Amino acid sequence: MATIVFFPEGAYGPTNNCVAIGQVLRERGHRVVFVIEESFAGALEAQGFEERLMRLGPAPETEEEPGQFWKDFIRETAPVFRKPTIEQLSEFIVPTFGALCDGARYVDDRLREIFDELEPDVIVEDNVVCFPAIEAAQRPWARIVSCNPLELKDEGVPPVFSGYPAADRSGWDAFGAEYLRAIDELHGSFSAFCEERGAPPLPSGELIHESPYLNLYLYPEEADYARTRPLAPTWHRLDSCVREVTEPFALPAELERPDGSLVYLSLGSLGSADVELMRRLVDVLARSPHRFIVSKGPQHAEYELADNMWGREFLPQPAILPHVDLVITHAGNNTTTESWHYGKPMIALPLFWDQYDNAQRVDETGFGVRLPTYAFADEDLLGAVERLLADTALHERLERVSRRVQSAEGRRTAADLIERLAHERAPVTR
């Protein structure tokens, strides 16, 4: 039996992906421990895992909701989401990276205590900045990228965070240059910190290393990007990574009527905190003849749903997706890849980070439609709903994607690779 420690970013998407893999490893008899923020305490224990708690900053004076720091951060910076992605680099992307780097500095000693106590056979992290304690532990470690794979940079693909099309290079160079300029100061200071704490210096333009042992990224082959240079042999693609559904879902009585298709609306736990945006979506979609399941999010008490809708603060997404005909999403990587897993077309309304890249990829691969989140016309959203629901060829194509992706069993593939790393303690190559 191996001891496998998972250290996901303090958000539901990365945590749920790690849970999916952890479930398989636990079934195989391994000891699986999650390192999580104190605000998530008990969430993983409730799913049968051990927990070790840490903080990314000083304790607040009042009790926190899970991931409260990031909910507050997103709410305060939400006006930036209305700006072009190139302007978001200095006003949102770099400040977010800066906050994450501050967290890595704050938690480094605590992580070392945890790793010394647990003596893990493998550490599995899903983060976007380096945590030097992982590499200083001198144990095999794996990196999961549960963001859009443009994070793995290549001259032949659009720059990450841009949302730019793969078929039009006209803005790539300017965006890439602005990214390097905006991140330069943070990169220098954080790389120096990493070296001070026993990790290698950071590669140019990067705030995290790839693992010399094992690297996993999450995207189906049908939507992945064509690269000019192959990834290192330690990189492995997971077509999907969906946790086992343990909570049953029955269609609520309010939506049990024969007419109209069933649509799932989720802007994620952070995006749904934009109450003004959620109210507008409710108002527009109230005019649709279809039925809607709405993930209302942390501000659920601040707005009401229309008569053709039902929702709750949190919903068991993997249990719901098989039942719906269409997904309206912020295009977070978790929801996007889960929608492909279950073969659902998407209307993408991106807000921040790699959501623009996922939204663009959904649109340019023909798996759905990207709309401007704060500037769409009512008829554009309603029209997209009708077009996608009526597109028989698209539904058949997505059904084929779903069958192949599900048969690939990404979470079991990931567990196999992690087990191999625990056993061989050497690079796991393709």
Image (cartoon, helix red, strand yellow):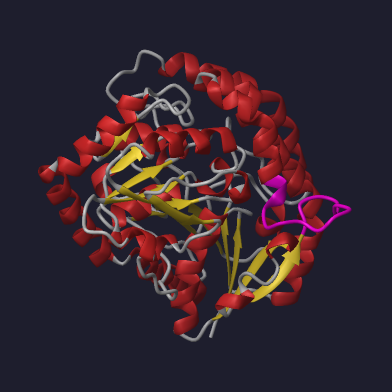
Left or right of 100? Residue 105 is right
**Image-quadrant location for residue 251:** bottom left
The residue segment tinted magenta is 55-70
Can residue 153 be spotted in the picture? no
| Viewer-proximal residue among 187 and 372 | 372
Is 68 in the magenta?
Answer: yes
Tell me residue 364's x, y (percent).
26, 31
Residue shown at 67%/45% (left/top)? 70
**Image-quadrant location for residue 377:** top left
Tell me residue 142's x, y (percent).
52, 60
Residue 69 vertical position relative to residue 55 in the rendered view, above or below: above
| Viewer-proximal residue among 322 and 32 | 322
Can residue 259 be spotted in the picture? yes
Residue shown at 34%/47% (left/top)? 327
Left or right of 40? Residue 405 is left
The number of callouts visible is: 0
Residue 327 vertical position relative to residue 2 in the rendered view, above or below: above
Is 51 in the magenta?
Answer: no
Magenta span dominant secondary structure = loop
Query: Residue reaching furthest front?
Result: 307
Left or right of 97? Residue 216 is left
Tell me residue 104's x, y (percent).
73, 48
Residue shown at 61%/24% (left/top)? 80
| Viewer-proximal residue among 363 and 149 | 363
Quarter of the image with the C terminus in it: bottom left
Tell me residue 165's x, y (percent).
33, 24
Residue 296 vertical position relative to residue 24 in the rendered view, above or below: above
Residue shown at 26%/45% (left/top)? 345
